[in-house]
Amino acid sequence: MVRRINLITLCCILFAATAAHSQTPPEVLARGAKYVALGSSFAAGPGISEQLGTCGRSDHNYSNLVATALNLTLTVVSCNGATIDNIRNTLQRDLPPQIDAVSPDTALVTVTIGGNDINFTSSTFACSGTAADEHCTANLDQAAINNELGQLPDELGAMLDDIKAKAPQAIIVLVTYPRVFPVDAANCSELELSVEDTAYLADLGQKLEDAFVSVTSSRQILIAEAYAQAAGHGPCAPPAERWVNGANIADAGIRYHPTAEGHSEMARLVLAALGVN
């Protein structure tokens, strides 16, 4: 879906500083420059108004907010359930690989992906609501998950290299998953998980974050650190301060996914990574 987004009052939400203190975006991101948004449901924005009819894409997901703030021409191909292969080379249902939207004239690419490759969200869904003395994660195929975790840095790296090959001049920003499980998550009823399951899933989320940090450290790729910055804004926070829903929906979105506030904050972090205050 391609749409041209005009600069509107949303800029006031995204920027706390006044225009006099704002930096201009990199020269390559001139007004109207092409921006392609890749990723899974954490990028698409399921449950957040207004939904655009397919793949859980919202017109207020972080990519739309960034495009509005910088007056870029946006192509959104993020999709619920997407994996790294669905970006690189594999159909998702009847949808072509997301990377097909990237072209040599693309100036900016953002991507949030990898959680579905290691069954992160699906495992959380599967275990939510189990009794406090049950150990749902013991029934998961942890060997397969560990195998995928071992391959994740290389797979992410290959994907980023593919994007760079298609758009050599593009700025690429890897946007990490906001942290779902805070340190004291075992005491948070909003998660509806046992202590053991919470600990396992929290560790899985940390390993996903570690893969993002590792793969960007060896490449000229920017990172928008939603995971690190989301401390205190997870499902256990007061509803108005949540970047991520728990088992119950705080304001918008779906379970265990970013809220509307979360997408606003992810957009702010992308802009900060680009040097825009």
Image (cartoon, grey):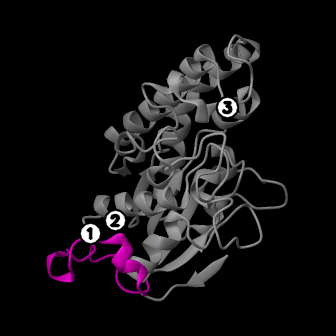
- What residue is shown at x 56% (from left), y 70% (from top)? 60
Mark 2 or mark 1, which is nearer the start of the sequence?
2
- Asked which secondary structure carries label 1, the reply is loop
Residue bearing mark 3: 124
Report the amino acid beneath label 1: Val
Residue 168 against residue 250 in the figure, above or below: below
Q: Quadrant location of the N terminus?
A: bottom right
Mark 3 or mark 2, which is nearer the start of the sequence?
3
Write the start and end of the magenta stretch as one range.
8-33
Query: With 227 as the anchor, is 277 left or right in this view?
Result: left
Residue 88 against residue 227 in the figure, above or below: below
- Mark 3 vs mark 1: in front: 3
Indicate which disc residue 271 carries. 2
Residue bearing mark 1: 276
Q: Main secondary structure of the magenta part?
A: loop
CA neighbours of label 3 inside 10 A, class few (<14), some (14 to 19), many (20+): many
- Asked which secondary structure carries label 3, the reply is helix
CA neighbours of label 2 inside 10 A, class few (<14), some (14 to 19), many (20+): many
Mark 1 or mark 3, which is nearer the start of the sequence?
3
CA neighbours of label 1 inside 10 A, class few (<14), some (14 to 19), many (20+): some
Indicate which disc residue 51 carries. none
Report the amino acid beneath label 2: Leu
- What residue is shown at x 56% (from left), y 67% (from top)? 102
